[in-house]
Image (cartoon, helix red, strand yellow):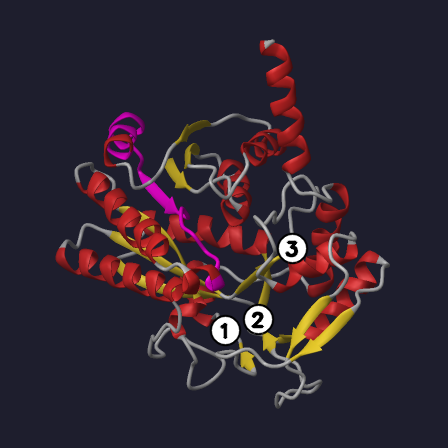
């Protein structure tokens, strides 16, 4: 199939790009590179041993997106392009609604004018808000607690309405729990812009010396070690789920369906810190801080529907998550930044 991947240079997008190429599909990537690096795409091409086409641009640019869809003629779309920092969405919500909601509508309008009706959406477990029970299944009520989560929930509702109005659409809503790790090659991985908002990249940056310690928010939860527990899954497992969802959409999938992507097991913050220390062979200093508002004691998925309908399950272990994340961080202590700066310097020298 011809597959359009928006946000394909990002953390999850780049890992999914590797798997989609490995499955033999023809791919075009659309990315603004606002929160991603073109270097990630160069490394994906090296890993895949084959090239793919790329357009630099914003998914909100209706003219650009319409022309791209008309030219490339995708048969399926995997849509990652979005802003994703929860804390920043609270401080400045408008860009999140503009990029995540309005950007998706612009993309869907372009697709509606084409024959393409297969759509895989990068959603999030944040659409469940504070769930009433765990493990969380797809039937639980949705109620997001921050603008980022609400932008994902609004987009899900738009896609549900679209599929309801036109049965030719097949849409997979992939609700991620906590993606971590990196490609086992160490060539691509998570490279957050600014201070990491998620646990594992912060731990990895502590291990490599970029931060003195990691803060653990709350050690008085009703959990075995008092720290919060989450469902962490390896980003390579997550990437493979997108290929499975695309296959589902192409071979018998109907309507708009949601799928939880997780391991079905909760891991505590302290477990993660200790596992990363073991994988890296370095101490991970931590400090204890008060609970954050909105945090819950346990959050983990019931991934049974993805197993039954997509034929997908998470296979990689916590040890592999930590070892692969450390391989990436150790080999790229400043992420893609050093390479990008060196290339920019070379370009400037070449022009003089």
Against 312, is 227 above or below?
Answer: below
Q: From the viewer's perspective, tell me whether residue 282 is left or right of residue 31.
A: right
Q: Which is nearer the eye, 29 or 81?
A: 81
Q: CA distance from mark 3 to mark 1?
A: 18 Å
Of mark 3 and mark 2, the one earlier in the sequence is: 3
Quadrant where the N terminus is found in the figure: top left
Quarter holding residue 188: top right
Which dot, 3 or 1, sits closer to the camera? 3
Against 252, is 113 above or below?
Answer: above
Q: Position of residue 235 (x, y in %)?
A: 58, 54
Q: Is residue 190 visible?
A: yes
Residue 67 inside the magenta-drawn segment = yes
Q: Residue furthest top?
A: 352
Asked whether disc 1 touches disc 2, contact meaning CB atoms under 8 Å apart, the reply is yes
* Residue segment shown in magenta: 65-87
Q: Position of residue 217 (x, y in %)?
A: 63, 76
Against 290, is 233 above or below?
Answer: above
Bin the neighbour count of mark 3 within 10 Å (Cα to Cα): few under 14, some 14-19, many 20 and up: many
Q: Residue furthest left?
A: 165
Quarter holding residue 117: top left
Residue 298 inside the magenta-drawn segment = no
Q: Position of residue 6 (x, y in %)?
A: 40, 41
Q: Position of residue 166 (x, y in %)?
A: 14, 53
Of mark 3 and mark 1, the one earlier in the sequence is: 3
Q: Residue at x 54, y 33 (%)?
A: 41
Q: Secondary structure at mark 1?
A: loop
Bin the neighbour count of mark 1 within 10 Å (Cα to Cα): few under 14, some 14-19, many 20 and up: many
- Residue linked to disc 2: 231
Q: Which mark is residue 301?
A: 1
Q: Which mark is residue 15?
A: none
């Amino acid at each position: 199939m011809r597959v359009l991947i928006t946000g394909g240079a990002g953390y999850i997008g780049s890992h999914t790009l590797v798997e989609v190429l490995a499955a033999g599909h023809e791919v075009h990537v659309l990315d603004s590179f606002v929160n991603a690096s073109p270097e990630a795409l160069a490394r994906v091409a090296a890993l895949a041993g084959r090239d793919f086409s790329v357009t630099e641009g914003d998914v909100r640019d209706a003219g650009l997106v319409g022309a791209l869809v008309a030219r490339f003629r995708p048969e399926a779309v995997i849509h990652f392009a979005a802003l994703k920092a929860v804390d920043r969405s609270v401080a400045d919500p408008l860009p999140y609604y503009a990029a995540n909601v309005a950007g998706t509508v612009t993309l869907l309008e372009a697709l509606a004018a084409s024959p393409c009706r297969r759509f895989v959406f990068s959603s999030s477990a944040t659409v469940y808000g504070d769930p009433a029970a765990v493990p969380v299944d797809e039937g639980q009520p949705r109620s997001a607690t921050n603008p980022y989560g609400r932008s994902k929930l609004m987009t899900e509702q738009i896609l549900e309405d679209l599929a309801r109005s036109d049965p030719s659409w097949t849409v997979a809503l992939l609700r991620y729990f906590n993606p971590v790790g990196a490609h086992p090659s160490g060539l691509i991985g998570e490279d957050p812009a600014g201070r990491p908002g998620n646990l594992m990249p912060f731990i990895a940056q502590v291990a490599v010396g970029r931060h003195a310690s990691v803060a653990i928010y709350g050690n008085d939860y009703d959990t075995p070690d008092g720290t919060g527990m989450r469902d962490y899954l390896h980003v390579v497992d997550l990437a493979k789920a997108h290929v499975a969802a695309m296959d589902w959409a192409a071979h018998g999938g109907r309507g708009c369906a949601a799928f939880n992507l997780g391991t079905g097991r909760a891991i505590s913050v302290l477990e993660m810190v200790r596992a990363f220390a073991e994988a890296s062979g370095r101490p991970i200093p931590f400090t204890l801080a008060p609970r954050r508002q909105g945090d819950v004691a346990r959050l983990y998925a019931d991934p049974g529907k993805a197993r039954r309908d997509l034929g997908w399950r998470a296979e990689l272990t916590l040890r592999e998550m930590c070892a692969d994340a450390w391989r990436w961080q150790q080999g790229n202590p400043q992420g893609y930044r050093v390479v990008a700066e060196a290339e920019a310097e070379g370009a400037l020298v070449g022009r003089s």
